[in-house]
Image: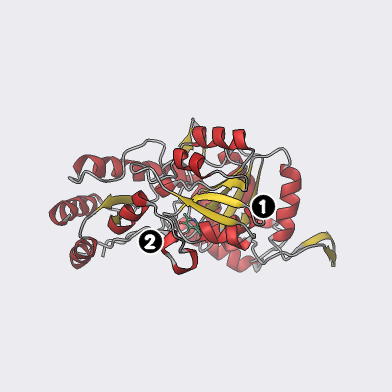
């Protein structure tokens, strides 16, 4: 079976896990060791004010919104995303306001953001869908004119660039996921990249909140002034992350090459476009009879996915709203393998069977 997602594992990853195992230093709430090293290297990679490592993209989003008072206030977001993109707003007492997406990028539509702004809006939460950069120029203009925060969901976007700068260096808080299927893979992991004049203060708050609210540690003594969670990254993840970070640009280049081939050779009109700044975490096509199409590919040894069922159609988030583009895409979207482990023959096979059955 050609897997839909697959991490790139080299001999150095195996060695690094063994080294952490033998060190017996596996976890550090205080964020020392490899975790600290990973934060420093990632900060240099994205060129932001500060980076705080956590144990998932979900934790990153939950903590990022804890920096702002969003209680009973509205946050504008797309509905075509993983559920954590909405949960983080509710978790922090806010109200998610779903708006429609652009049909070509599947990223949030800036025009729809403008229409959704009310006196209660406090933030915009764009998702760089599949690694495609959102129109941050427009989104930043809107945010500035209404005094809104931008918290980016960059779970798919390690290595994506916008305006010649890596994603991670634009929004107030940018949240990454290092889930094993992501371009930079760990067993579990995430990170918040901060670009804000108060970044030092934010960093201290997040250090404490990611480890149960613990502050002012001096040897065995410490204090707790507020709530916190067990959200800190472990040493295995950080050790793997350091190696994955070194090669992520090279691996993204391979993904881009495959994407270009898909764009040129897949005979479907509605498919992900080519953009040399995209990380291509995933590659999507739109198919009318999705179930039948996916069954055919599965029978021929090709795993596919559906990313995503729109969040506003989930029971918890069901409101009386209509998002026609999101809903239409939600019915037709199929993701096909694009990871850097694919062999030439496998890429050819994917193209052939997609063209045969779409
Ligand atoms: C768009 C998006 N946001 C957030 C997340 C949450 O990341 P994690 O699985 O690391 O908690 C994911 C992961 O699947 C995602 O795809």
Residue name at image x 52 percent, y 60 percent = 84
Q: Ligand 1 near label 2 (Cβ, under 8 Å)? A: no
Q: Which one is in front in this view, the residue at disc 1 or the one at disc 2?
A: 2
In the picture of the structure, the residue carrying the numbered disc 2 is 309
For residue 140, side relative to residue 224 (left or right): left
Percent from the top left, x then y, of residue 108?
44, 44
Residue name at image x 64 percent, y 45 percent = 40
Q: Secondary structure at mark 1?
A: helix
Q: Are marks 1 and 2 in contact (CB under 8 Å)?
A: no
Location of the N terminus (image quadrant): bottom left
Q: CA distance from mark 1 to mark 2?
A: 36 Å
Percent from the top left, x then y, of residue 155?
49, 52
Tell me, yes or no, if residue 340 can be seen here: no
Q: Secondary structure at mark 2?
A: loop
Percent from the top left, x then y, of residue 298?
22, 66
Q: Ligand 1 near label 1 (Cβ, under 8 Å)? A: no
Mark 1 is surrounded, within 10 Å at the Cα level, by few (under 14), some (14 to 19) or many (20 or more) other residues, namely some
Location of the C terminus (image quadrant): bottom left
Mark 2 is surrounded, within 10 Å at the Cα level, by few (under 14), some (14 to 19) or many (20 or more) other residues, namely some
Q: How is the image coloured?
A: secondary structure
Residue 256 falls in image quadrant? top left
Residue 315 falls in image quadrant? bottom left
For residue 320, side relative to residue 203 (left or right): left
Q: Nearer the viewer, residue 16 or 107?
A: 107
Looking at the rendered structure, which numbered label has been put on residue 36? 1
Tell me, yes or no, if residue 304 can be seen here: yes
For residue 339, side relative to residue 123 (left or right): left
Q: Nearer the viewer, residue 144 or 284?
A: 144
Percent from the top left, x then y, of residue 8?
41, 55
Residue name at image x 52 percent, y 51 percent = 243
């Amino acid at each position: 079976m050609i897997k839909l997602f697959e991490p790139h594992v080299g001999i150095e990853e195996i060695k690094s896990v063994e080294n952490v195992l033998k060190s017996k230093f596996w976890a550090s709430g205080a964020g020392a060791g490899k975790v600290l090293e990973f934060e420093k290297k990632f900060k240099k990679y994205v060129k932001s004010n500060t980076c705080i490592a956590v144990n998932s993209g979900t934790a990153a989003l939950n903590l990022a919104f804890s920096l702002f008072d969003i209680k009973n206030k509205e946050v504008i977001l797309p509905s075509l995303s993983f559920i954590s993109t909405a949960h983080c707003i509710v978790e922090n007492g806010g109200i998610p306001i779903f708006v429609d997406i652009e049909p070509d990028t599947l990223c949030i539509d800036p025009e729809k953001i403008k229409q959704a702004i009310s006196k209660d809006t406090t933030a915009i939460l764009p998702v760089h869908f599949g690694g495609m950069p959102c129109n941050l120029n427009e989104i930043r203009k809107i945010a500035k004119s209404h005094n809104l925060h931008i918290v980016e969901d960059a779970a798919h976007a390690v290595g994506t660039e916008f305006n010649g700068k890596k994603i991670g260096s634009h929004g107030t808080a940018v949240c990454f996921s290092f889930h094993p299927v992501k371009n930079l893979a760990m067993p579990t992991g995430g990170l918040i990249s901060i670009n804000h004049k108060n970044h030092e203060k934010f960093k201290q708050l997040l250090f404490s909140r990611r480890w149960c609210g613990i502050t002012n540690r001096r040897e065995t003594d410490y204090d707790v002034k507020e709530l916190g969670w067990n959200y800190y990254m472990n040493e295995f993840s950080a050790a793997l992350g350091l190696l994955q970070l070194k090669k992520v640009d090279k691996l993204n280049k391979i993904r881009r090459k495959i994407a270009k081939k898909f764009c040129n050779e897949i005979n479907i009109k509605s498919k992900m476009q080519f953009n040399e700044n995209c990380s291509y975490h995933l590659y999507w096509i739109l198919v009318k009879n999705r179930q039948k199409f996916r069954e055919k590919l599965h029978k021929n040894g090709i795993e596919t996915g559906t990313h995503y069922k729109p969040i506003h159609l989930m029971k918890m988030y069901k409101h009386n709203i209509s998002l026609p583009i999101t809903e239409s895409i939600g019915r037709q979207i199929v993701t096909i393998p694009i990871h850097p482990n694919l062999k030439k023959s496998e890429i050819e096979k994917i193209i052939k069977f997609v063209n045969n059955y779409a």
